[in-house]
Image: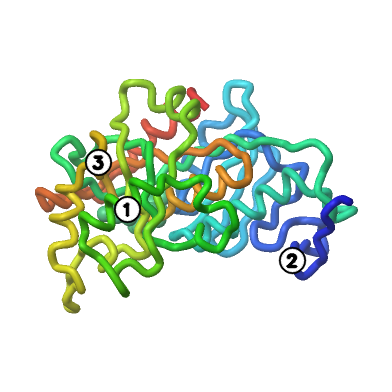
Amino acid sequence: MKKYFPSSELIINEDGSVFHLHVKPEWLADKVILVGDPGRVALVASHFENKECEVESREFKTITGTYKGKRITVVSTGIGCDNIDIVMNELDALANIDFVTREEKDQFRQLELVRIGTCGGLQPNTPVGTFVCSQKSIGFDGLLNFYAGRNAVCDLPFERAFLNHMGWSGNMCAPAPYVIDANEELIDRIAKDDMVRGVTIAAGGFFGPQGRELRIPLADPKQNNKIEAFEYKGYKITNFEMESSALAGLSRLMGHKAMTVCMVIANRLIKEANTGYKNTIDTLIKTVLDRI
Ligand code: R1P
Ligand code: URA
């Protein structure tokens, strides 16, 4: 029996597009670039030779076009793993569910997803301007805990080592951080040997969860010192951003290939930031477009 998805579970708009993204199935390419900022979609698409569709709803802006003969869809996710849950489930539905019969398709279609983002660097080898590719992500967000199979795809010994090192219990580890690998083949092809490979914390916020203290004190004032000092089997934590864990986790569970590469715009160790990063991120965008 094929799985059937009623209209309450998979919401399809009257024009046949998927609920939040407003994208129709025929508009989705196999190669997908995800960016946080909707403004970055136009920057990616400015390199396309042609555009076949452009649609926008809330923070989700989508353009499909061609780059050097490759059909590519670029989608903005906005900020946070909650949005990645929406984007990944809707992209997977566009690829693998028949929108007429509302049944799973017979043939699985695999997507290749690369997130191009910005991040905060945590180590001496991640100064402002570095491109850091997330080999592993530590999810502070808890999203993956709601899906069956979470333990089968996560690195449980790494999770335990991290929690022991942080000395967190009770509220500080609820939901428990999950550790998940990006797709290795995609990392080898896109990061090659000119990007830093690291471990990324996908935080559930930009301030407290990333150890930024403005007026309200942090629950663990030593959080970032401990994170910077953590080492497990040669891995050190390199950067903070806010989406890579859910992207890697949901892609693994769904059978897609995914990775995240971010440009460092703030180095937390030396307390330095750069807000004028448009040109440097365009270099990263062109590199990813050439290698995807
Ligand atoms: C925070 O400023 C945002 O920037 C980073 C974080 O992950 C978060 O989404 O990525 P983007 O530049 O892709 O949005
Ligand atoms: N994005 C983040 O999530 N953190 C930073 O420090 C910079 C960009």
Q: Which residue sits at x=20%, y=52%?
A: 227
| Residue 45 visible in the current orientation | no
What scheme was used to colour the molecule? Answer: rainbow
Q: Is residue 57 left or right of residue 243?
A: right
Residue at position x 82%, y 65% in the image: 6
| Residue 25 locus on image (x, y percent) | 76, 46
Choose top left, top right, bottom left or bottom right for residue 210: bottom left
Of residues 6 and 252, which is closer to you in this image? 252
Query: Does residue 263 lie above or below 86 as drawn?
Result: above
| Distance between mark 2 and mark 3 Cα atoms | 40 Å
Q: Is residue 227 left or right of residue 61?
A: left
Q: Which residue is mark 1?
A: 160
- Tell me the residue that label 2 is attached to: 9
The residue that disc 3 covers is: 232
Task: Measure the alpha-carbon separation of dots 1 and 3.
Answer: 11 Å
Quick one: which residue is furthest to the left in this view? Answer: 270
Q: Amino acid at mark 1?
A: Arg
Residues 250 and 270: in front is: 250
Element carrying mark 2: loop
**On the rendered structure, is 25 left or right of 128?**
right
**Residue 105 coordinates in the image, percent (x, y):** 82, 43
Residue displayed at 57% across by 64% down: 58
Cβ of disc 3 within 8 Å of ligand 2?
no
Ligand 1, by image quadrant, is bottom left
Q: Which numbered disc flags the more N-terminal residue, 1 or 2?
A: 2
Distance between the alpha carbons at the discs numbered 1 and 2: 35 Å
